[in-house]
Each structure stands twice: as structure tokens, then as C-alpha cells.
Image (cartoon, coloured by chain):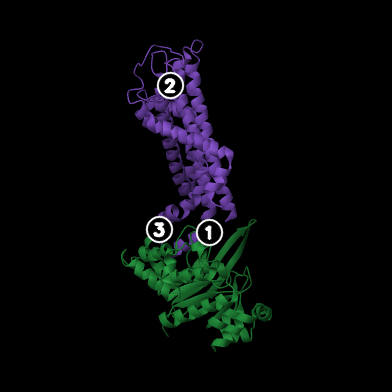
Chain colours: A purple, B green
């Protein structure tokens, strides 16, 4: 059976996919619907939601449009989540492949470095990194990737250890292929499926970490972020709880959507692998 | 007499198991002349495949010498070893495991041509078609994925890859054992044709004496990592001297009637 159809049979996968598609649509259309600066003042301060239909979700403490902030914040969450996960998986896959394929001293050194990164809580690592280097989008992405690449590295290494004993790797050596080409062209692509299965968890964690950093005021100050919105709303939590609740719900839905859709993809590919 | 193509002497490989050292290959010596087929026979665990892997430097030996085309093959490393590999090729037992599961036929045949600089990028598709034709396959197969074609076709692709670099010796490690009887006969015929036309020597590793007497000039019978006896293939299989040789011959007719028939057909 076609994997797409199998994917569409699982209701939770569909729910995840719908949330993700909506999130992408929101992120991509943010500058279409809200072309101006989302940090500009749009109306009276602390307007509750559903009062004024030109400002459907109301305004915050400074009179900024909450819906515009939400749309632009989706952009940051998605960009940071995807970029950090891609960086973490790329670095992890390369480190894991080199360690597993080369073995010996290289393996020892790379895996002890991996251990060192894994023993430090990843949020603390991100916090320290951003505090030292300074908050900007690229730094936040790097900081999150710094704590997330160890999982992919371990999975890739374990997979490479079993693949490198297979005949086709011996065959590649027999025809005189360079060891680096064997590692990255023959072995790595075959080791990727279980590594990619981690991506939904990593994206979801990256979005949460970004929100947490922004909440602590360590996000990119020039960008709208959901974490920053929650932090902003915290000051008036009793008077205007919606200012914290709205971005909070967006965050929960996004993480749930990423996770469900990712699980759906893993399920479908897992069934396909076991059948073949 | 000219120098042998391959001269193996005192080849030894030990493994450590439970603190004790076990010799998988123990002081094995043999020669192969250009254009000759030497068979390595013996029961499972006698060290046949270990010898194949030692010869191809897929694993390293503990002692012994391997002279190939007049040079010390064991002293080579890095780029020099990779370049030399063009002349010494191998065909594996399981034709599915021997290829990257994601590869296409064209890519499998393109790799040796590219790595050894045998043909330019624009020439390669033509060379791949010629190789496919050489092993009796249609050039249309080039675009297919390895997992889409049959076992017999895959083993022909493996042979095409092995001859792509114009080797002087091909190690065939149980290369026909996984194939069904009719396909096995066709592949053996292909190997004999290639040998006649290109004077390629074969080291033919098999536990199947029927197949060996059909294809090999000489045979070396191994037992527990040592050479039990060696000599002309027909003579040894007709009248084995060693205990293990006798045991193999006694076991053979029941198991390999069809392949011995294949040998009789060609005589």
C-alpha cells in the first residue's frame, strides 16, 4: 500500500499534519496579512480579544496587535525549530558516522566528546551559549543544536557499526573506493532512517527551548517570539490572562502537531521497512 | 616457468576466543598461474572465506606473504593499495548483500570506472552498456534498482563490476552457491567464457566438489585452516588422499548430481 494512504489512515497523523499545514500557512502569510512591524502600536493598550474586529485577539500592554504578534511569532518558532533540528541531525549524523566507521581512537575521542555534551543539561548549555555570544537568531539556532546533536550521533553510530560489517561495504573497498566516500556515500544514507525518526522529537524540543530562551529574554530582540509574548503577558497575568494564554496555546498546539505528524511518518515508514 | 600471478606463503590468521588463540588460517601456501582456476574446497569453518578476505586485504593477516603480479601485496597501503585493487577483484556469495541497497545497476558499474579513471564521465554510459552486454544482460537494465532484478542477474552484475577494471585475478567466494541450479550453470559458463577470452585467473571458493571439478584446474582442500591436500582437480576429486578429501567426495554425489552433470556436458 502507498505510504501516503497509510499515513492518512491514522487519525492522529492527520491531526498533526493539519496543525503543521496551518502553522506553515500562518508563518508564510504573516507579512501578507500583517505587512507592518508587529511590534508597532496598533490600538489602545490591553484591549481584550473579540471586542474590536480590526484587532480580533486584542492588544497587549503596549497596544500591539496580538494576532499580528502571533503570526510573526509562528515564523520564528518554525525557523528556529527546523533549522536547529536540521543542524543537530546533520552534525550528529556526521559525527556518528565518522566514529562508527573509523573505530579505534577516533571513535573513543568523538564518543567521549558526545558524552561530555550529553551530561550537561541541554537547556543550560543553550542558556550559557546565548548569554556569552549574545542573542540573535543564528546564535539561538546554534545554541539549541549544541544540546541536541548527541542523540542523532549515538543512533547514527550504532547503525553504522552494524552496516559497516555488511558485504556491500567490503565490495566498495574491493573496487578501491576511498574510505571517506564509503562512509558518506555508501554507509551514511543507509544509516539515516532511524536518525531521521528522531527529528520530530528534536523539532518539538527545539521550539520549546526557543520559547524558554525568549521567555527569559534571551531570544532575538528584533523578532517576535511566542516565548517573549508569554513573558510580556506575565506582568499582567491577573488583569489580562489571555496575553499569556494565547501564545501558550499556540505553542502547545505546534509541539503537539509536530510530534503527531512525525510519529505518523515514522509509523508508516516503519511498517514499510518491516514489509520489505 | 614464468612467475606465478599470485604466490601465497605461510598465510596465518588467528582469532582470540575466550582467552584462547584459534588459528582460522594456519600456514597456508599456494600459487595461482595467469589464466588458471584454483579451487579452495573444504567444509564450513575450514577457513575458505577468511583466506578470500585476507587476499583482498579486507582483514589483515598475522603472518605470511602475498605476492601479486610480482609485488608484495601486503606492504601496500592507502592510495597505492586502492589503485592495485583494480587488478584483484572479488565476487561475493550473496548478490543482494554485495550491493548498496539504494544503488542502481548503472551506479554499481559506474563506481569502478570512475574510481580508477578508466573512462571519462561522457564515455561511461557506453562502457556500462558494453559491460552489461559482456555478461549477457540488456543495456536497458542500467536504470533499474539492484533490488528490482533477479538473483541471477545480480550475480552477472557482480561479475560485470569485477571485470570492469580489467583484473588479472578474481576471487569468487561461493559465487554460485546461492543460485538455483539452472542459473548456476549459466553463470559458470559465463565465467569459463570470460576466462578463455581475457585470461583472467580465478580463485574459486566452494564447498561443492561437483562445481569445482567442472571449472577448476587445480584444487586445494582445506581442513581446520590447514592445507589437507592439493593437486590437479580431477585427480584429487577422483582419488582423494586425505581424510577430509575422502569425506567431501563421499558427501558430494548425493548433494550435487545436477552440477556434476553440468561438468559432463562440457567435456
Asked whether A159 or A246 is in front, the reply is A246
Q: Which of marks 3 and 1 is nearer the N terminus?
A: 1
Q: Toward which corner of the image does residue B114 lie, by quadrant? A: bottom left
Residue at which label 2 appears: A228
Whether A221 is drawn above or below B111: the answer is above
Sequence-first tag of 2 and 1: 1
Q: Which of A2 and A177 is in front in this view?
A: A2
- What count of labels does the image hold? 3
Closer to viewer: mark 3 or mark 2: 2
Of the 4 image quadrants, the one containing the C terminus of chain A is bottom right
Q: Which chain carries label 2?
A: A
Q: Where is residue B171 in the image (x, y as percent from the top left)?
A: 49, 72
Q: What element carries label 1?
A: loop
Q: Which mark is residue A205?
A: none
- Residue A178 - label: 3
Q: In percent of the image, x 55 and y 43: which residue is there? A: A8
Instruction: Give the structural element (helix, strand or loop) at label 2.
Output: helix
Residue for point 61% across, 79% down = B209
Q: Can residue B60 be seen in this view?
A: no
Residue at the spot of label 1: A166
In the image, residue A247 sits, relative to residue B221, either above or below, namely above
Where residue A86 appears, as percent x and y from the top left, is 43, 40
Question: Relative to the observer, which residue lies in front, B63 or B238?
Answer: B238
Residue B40 occupies which quadrant of the picture?
bottom right
Amino acid at each position: 500500500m502507498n505510504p501516503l494512504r497509510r499515513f492518512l489512515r491514522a487519525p492522529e497523523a492527520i491531526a498533526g499534519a493539519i496543525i503543521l499545514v496551518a502553522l506553515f500557512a500562518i508563518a508564510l502569510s504573516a507579512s501578507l496579512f500583517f505587512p507592518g512591524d508587529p511590534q508597532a502600536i496598533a490600538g489602545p493598550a490591553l484591549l481584550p480579544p473579540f471586542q474590536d474586529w480590526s484587532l480580533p485577539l486584542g492588544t497587549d500592554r503596549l497596544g500591539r496587535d496580538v494576532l499580528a504578534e502571533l503570526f510573526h511569532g509562528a515564523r520564528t518558532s518554525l525557523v528556529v525549530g527546523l533549522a536547529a533540528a536540521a543542524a543537530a541531525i546533520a552534525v550528529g549524523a556526521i559525527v556518528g558516522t565518522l566514529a562508527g566507521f573509523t573505530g579505534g581512537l577516533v571513535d573513543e575521542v568523538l564518543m567521549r566528546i558526545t558524552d561530555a555534551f550529553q551530561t550537561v543539561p541541554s537547556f543550560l548549555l543553550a542558556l550559557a551559549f546565548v548569554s556569552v555570544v549574545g542573542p540573535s537568531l543564528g546564535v539561538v539556532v546554534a545554541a539549541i543544536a549544541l544540546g541536541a546533536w548527541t542523540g542523532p550521533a549515538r543512533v547514527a553510530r550504532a547503525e553504522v557499526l552494524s552496516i559497516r560489517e555488511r558485504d556491500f561495504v567490503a565490495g566498495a573497498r574491493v573496487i578501491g573506493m576511498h574510505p571517506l566516500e564509503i562512509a558518506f556515500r555508501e554507509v551514511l544514507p543507509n544509516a539515516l532512517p532511524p536518525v531521521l525518526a528522531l527529528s520530530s522529537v528534536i523539532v518539538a524540543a527545539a521550539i520549546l527551548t526557543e520559547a524558554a530562551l525568549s521567555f527569559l529574554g534571551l531570544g532575538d530582540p528584533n523578532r517576535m517570539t511566542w516565548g517573549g509574548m508569554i513573558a510580556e503577558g506575565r506582568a499582567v497575568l491577573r488583569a489580562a490572562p489571555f496575553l499569556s494564554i494565547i501564545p501558550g496555546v499556540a505553542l502547545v498546539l505546534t509541539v503537539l502537531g509536530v510530534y503527531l505528524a512525525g510519529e505518523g511518518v515514522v509509523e508508516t515508514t516503519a511498517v514499510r521497512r518491516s514489509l520489505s | 616457468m614464468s612467475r606465478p600471478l599470485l604466490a601465497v606463503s605461510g598465510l596465518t590468521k588467528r582469532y582470540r576466543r575466550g582467552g584462547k588463540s584459534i588459528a582460522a588460517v594456519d600456514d597456508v601456501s599456494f600459487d595461482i598461474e595467469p589464466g588458471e582456476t584454483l579451487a579452495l574446497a573444504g567444509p564450513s569453518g575450514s577457513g575458505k572465506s577468511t583466506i578470500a578476505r585476507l587476499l583482498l586485504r579486507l582483514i589483515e593477516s598475522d603472518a605470511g606473504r602475498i605476492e601479486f603480479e610480482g609485488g608484495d601485496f601486503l606492504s601496500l597501503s592507502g592510495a597505492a593499495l586502492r589503485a592495485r585493487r583494480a587488478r584483484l577483484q572479488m565476487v561475493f556469495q550473496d548478490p543482494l548483500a554485495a550491493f548498496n541497497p539504494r544503488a542502481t545497476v548503472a551506479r554499481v558499474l559506474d563506481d569502478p570506472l570512475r574510481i580508477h579513471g578508466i573512462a571519462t564521465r561522457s564515455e561511461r554510459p557506453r562502457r556500462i552498456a558494453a559491460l552489461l552486454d559482456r555478461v549477457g544482460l540488456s543495456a536497458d537494465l542500467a536504470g533499474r534498482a539492484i533490488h528490482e532484478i533477479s538473483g541471477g542477474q545480480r550475480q552477472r552484475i557482480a561479475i560485470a563490476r569485477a571485470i570492469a577494471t580489467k583484473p588479472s585475478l578474481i576471487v569468487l567466494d561461493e559465487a554460485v552457491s546461492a543460485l538455483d541450479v539452472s542459473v548456476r550453470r549459466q553463470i559458470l559458463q559465463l565465467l569459463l567464457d570470460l576466462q578463455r577470452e581475457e585470461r583472467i585467473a580465478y580463485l574459486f571458493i566452494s564447498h561443492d566438489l561437483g562445481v569445482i571439478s567442472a571449472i577448476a584446474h587445480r584444487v586445494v582442500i582445506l581442513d581446520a585452516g590447514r592445507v589437507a591436500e592439493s593437486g590437479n582437480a580431477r585427480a584429487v576429486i577422483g582419488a582423494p588422499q586425505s581424510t577430509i578429501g575422502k569425506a567431501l567426495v563421499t558427501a558430494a554425489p548425493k548433494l550435487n548430481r545436477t552440477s556434476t552433470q553440468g561438468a559432463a556436458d562440457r567435456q
